[in-house]
Image: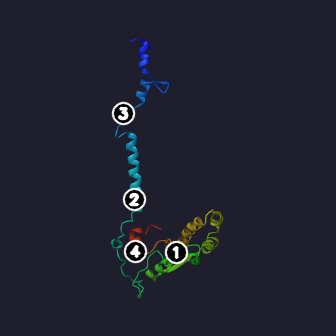
């Protein structure tokens, strides 16, 4: 086979244009069922869906019974038979104002108060939050006022409320199912004496 015949066998005419048959064969890869790219793609989809499923699945039931019950002591409130702890019995919640509370959260404050009759309940409006910062933490007021979003001010103020008064903070979308005394008692154990 001479050079011209070899060249012509490698070139084929298609629609008036010549193309190289040898190069077109090199470009065609055999189809494999599982290429590395497909495997990575499928693993990525699996991880994505498993993470999505875990975020959509309700959490496991919280077993409050696994925490000890506070023993009765000398500081017993006769009407409710509860004990005192180092954590003050104050519940803090915050929103723009009580009058603007969404209907989905309208019963949240009363639910906390009903399940915790011995606790003081403090609702903090945006104005109350700013007054707390201005009165007790004036060094932070300029930072507080310069936050671009109101939710950032509310997030910062909740820490100052708990720092100043003590107690616990609960977001408005958190509904209690039981009294939190067993949890506070669990945090008030002798081995926690050195912790603040």
Q: Which residue does the numbered mark 1 point to in the structure image? A: 92
Q: Residues within 10 Å of mark 1 (few under 14, many from 20)?
A: many
Which label sits in the foreground, 4 or 1?
Answer: 1
Spatial CA distance of label 4 from label 3 is 68 Å
Q: Position of residue 117 (x, y in %)?
A: 45, 83
The CA distance from mark 3 to mark 1 is 67 Å
Compare marks 2 and 4 and give the one earlier in the sequence: 2
Marks 4, 3: nearer the viewer: 3
Q: Quadrant of residue 79?
A: bottom left
Residue beneath label 3, please? Answer: 30
Is disc 4 in contact with disc 1, using a CB cutoff of under 8 Å? no
Alpha carbon of mark 3 to alpha carbon of mark 2: how far?
36 Å
Whether residue 139 sits left or right of residue 5 in the image: it is: right
Q: Nearer the viewer, mark 3 or mark 2?
A: 3
Q: Is residue 152 left or right of residue 116?
A: right
Disc 3 element? loop
Give percent across and percent down for residue 141: 64, 67
Q: Residue at x 37, y 43 (%)?
A: 39
Question: Which of 187/1 is in front?
Answer: 1
């Amino acid at each position: 086979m001479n050079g011209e015949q070899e060249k012509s066998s490698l070139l084929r005419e298609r629609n008036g244009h010549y193309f190289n048959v040898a190069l077109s064969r090199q470009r065609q890869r055999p189809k494999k069922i599982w290429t590395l790219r497909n495997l990575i793609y499928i693993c990525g989809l699996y991880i994505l869906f498993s993470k999505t499923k875990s975020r959509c699945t309700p959490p496991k039931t919280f077993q409050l019974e696994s925490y000890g019950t506070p023993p009765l002591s000398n500081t017993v409130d006769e009407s409710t038979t509860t004990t005192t702890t180092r954590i003050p019995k104050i519940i803090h919640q915050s929103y723009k104002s009580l009058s603007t509370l969404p209907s989905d959260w309208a019963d949240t404050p009363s639910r906390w108060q009903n399940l915790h009759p011995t606790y003081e309940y403090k609702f903090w409006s945006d104005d109350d939050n700013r007054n707390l910062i201005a009165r007790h933490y004036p060094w932070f007021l300029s930072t507080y006022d310069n936050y671009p979003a109101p939710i950032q001010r509310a997030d910062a103020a909740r820490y100052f409320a708990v720092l100043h008064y003590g107690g616990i903070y609960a977001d408005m979308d958190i509904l209690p199912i039981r009294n939190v005394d067993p949890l506070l008692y669990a945090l008030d154990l002798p081995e926690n004496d050195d912790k603040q």
